[in-house]
Amino acid sequence: MTWAMTPEIGVGAVIYRQDTTHGRGEILLVQRAHSPGQGLWALPGGHLMWGESLTGALQREITEELHITIHIGQLIYVAELLGPSHHLVILDYAATVARGQPTVGSDARDYRWVSALEIKSLSLAPGMEAFLASPKVRSTLQWG
């Protein structure tokens, strides 16, 4: 059996911080600058390249999008996005900022630290609502 298309593998960073001003946890989201999902908010990350490790791809993508380096923690979510012209498998890892302050790079129009309450007001990319509903994600982020 020959397949005309194969699934693409992507990686995402669930970059978390404790907001000391408001006493709540926040994650870093990016607003996509290009299609698919231009203008929508999502986790930073991107596609795995041939010969690249998952964590290597994640570090590269975060550096390109936000000009920071991260500490990568455990895998906390796996998303599968199926459509008529795409099949994506995305592995999302817990992370914290290791070095630098975020600034907008390639593939991102904007970035924002958001709490569980604030995220509800954003236009989210496909798959983000299922991500946010995951018990493991909510537990990891301590979002109840």
Image (cartoon, rainbow, N blue to C red):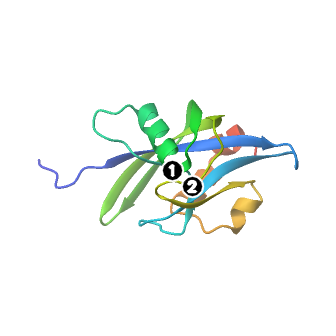
Q: Secondary structure at mark 1?
A: helix
* 39, above or below 105, in the image: below
Asked which secondary structure carries label 2, the reply is: loop
Residue type, label 2: Val
35 sits left or right of 21 in the view: left
Q: Which quadrant of the figure has residue 137?
A: top right
* Direction from residue 100 to residue 77 in the image, left or right: left
Residue 104 vertical position relative to residue 144 in the rendered view, above or below:
below
The number of numbered badges drawn on the structure is 2
- Give the spatial CA distance, label 2 vs label 1: 6 Å
Classify residue 102 as left or right of residue 109: right
Q: Which mark is residue 32?
A: none
- For residue 36, what is the image quadrant? bottom left
**Mark found first going from the N terminus, 2 or 1:** 1
Q: x, y percentage for residue 134?
A: 62, 48
Q: Nearer the viewer, residue 39 or 93?
A: 39
Give the residue at mark 2.
104
Cβ–Cβ under 8 Å for marks 2 and 1:
yes
The x, y position of residue 35, in whole percent, is 41, 67
**Looking at the image, which residue is at 64% across and 37% down?**
97
Q: Amino acid at mark 1?
A: Glu
Establish if 117 lies above or below 49.
below
Along the line of sight, the residue nearer the viewer: 68 or 78: 68
For the point 61% across and 69% down, the residue is 123
Q: Position of residue 80 (x, y in %)?
A: 43, 51
Q: Which mark is residue 65?
A: 1
Residue 129 point in image, percent of width and height: 60, 59
- The answer to whether residue 144 is visible is no
Camera-side residue: 60 or 105?
105
Q: Is residue 104 visible?
A: yes
User: Is disc 1 surrounded by few (<14), some (14 to 19) or many (20+) residues within 10 Å?
Assistant: many
